Image (cartoon, rainbow, N blue to C red):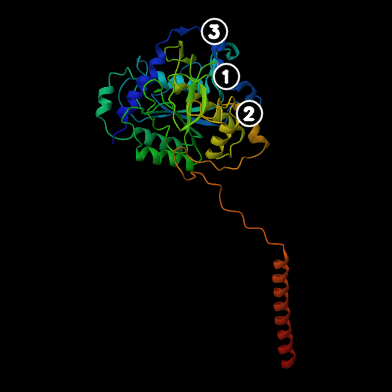
Amino acid sequence: MNRRPALAGAAAALLVALSAAPARADTVRDKQWGLAAMHAQEAWRTTKGAGVTVAVLDTGVDDQHPDLTGNVLPGRDLVGFGAKSGDRSWARHGTAMASIIAGHGHGPARGEGVLGVAPEAKVLPVRVILEGTDPSRDKARESRGNALAEGIRWAVDQGADVINLSLGDDSESAHPEAEEDAAVQYALRKGAVVVASAGNGGEKGDHISYPAAYPGVIAVTAVNAAGTHASFSTRRWYATVAAPGVDVVIADPDRSYYEGWGTSAASAFVSGAVALVRAAHPDLPPAEIKRLLARTARDAPSGGRDDSRGHGMVDSAAAIAAATRGRTPVHSTAAGHSAPYFGPGPAAPAPAPTGPETWSLAAGGAGLLLLATAATLWHTSRRR
């Protein structure tokens, strides 16, 4: 089945956020409430993400944006047609997500513009969908192939540490696609953390969204500045954690700044947080990072988890600190699956018994050893 049409449609829904009024560059930092909410500044005392690569599978990224220059690696276009650099329908959504993840600002001492969660991380752009306003969307509906699955595998093979998927299919006909699922599992086996938006269907039936629902993915829901679940954010069993997704300041290729909304933004925030954790603890496997984010999330729902906010608001500083104190054994179960997806590993050898039976066995063993030794000595003396 060709998945691209559904993904292109999803991109259109997620891009509604960009219709908001632009914000002046000198007011951007004051509006970036998400950084404080996720304790990013505290995490920066340890790391700002240097050495980590986050693949942004999206509509493309403007590598010349002043808030991103030097942080965007050479990428790949798996769509092959549609808007080009300089067109209004080019790379808007992808640039917005990249700025949330790894924006470094600009101007004197880079005090202006968008500051990302991991401002020293690198972005690897992979164009897998078209903007909702791209005139070539009809052509995309007729095209063949599975750009998302191919893009995930390509990004992993280029060394991506984190895969950000601020996209998804949450239509009524949404269903798992074998190639995408296999690509996600390939990424996890290779050590790449996969983060995806939970979906924007909270007011449209809460339909399951893919790739968020694939096993092993960190699925992110959206909350507002008060930490309350955003009404548009999909509520489902696969929700892992929540992140800022309302009134989020984003950069745009037109060099303006906008306030947007959506679980796309929430996913980007968590990908930035994962980049910080991975920079501080590069050997942590994806399953342990997922568990770590869940265990250290703030404002956990009653009972520890619910479908609207997962385990609570991601706290990047707390996750880094917890990983520093010691590893958490991994016994996580994939959402929606009864069997463990990442098991605890080989069973430890059973401890040796120490009761009376043990002494009997030991004595018996010692007796046999003595008999064997005596027989050997007897035969030796006869030969002599």
Q: Quadrant of the N terminus?
A: top left
Q: Quadrant of the C terminus?
A: bottom right
Discs 2, 1 touching: Cβ within 8 Å: no
The residue wearing badge 2 is 318
User: Is 79 positioned to the left or the right of 382 in the image?
Assistant: left
The residue carrying pointer 3 sits among few (fewer than 14), some (14 to 19) or many (20 or more) residues within 10 Å by Cα, namely some
Discs 2, 3 touching: Cβ within 8 Å: no
Amino acid at dot 1: Leu
The residue wearing badge 3 is 27
Q: Which callout, 2 or 3, points to the residue nearer the camera? A: 2
In primary-sequence order, the first of circles 1 and 3 is: 3
Would residue 72 be visible to someone looking at this image? Answer: no
The residue wearing badge 1 is 35
Q: Which callout, 1 or 3, points to the residue nearer the camera? A: 1
* Image point (73%, 73%), residue name: 363
Q: Which mark is residue 342?
A: none
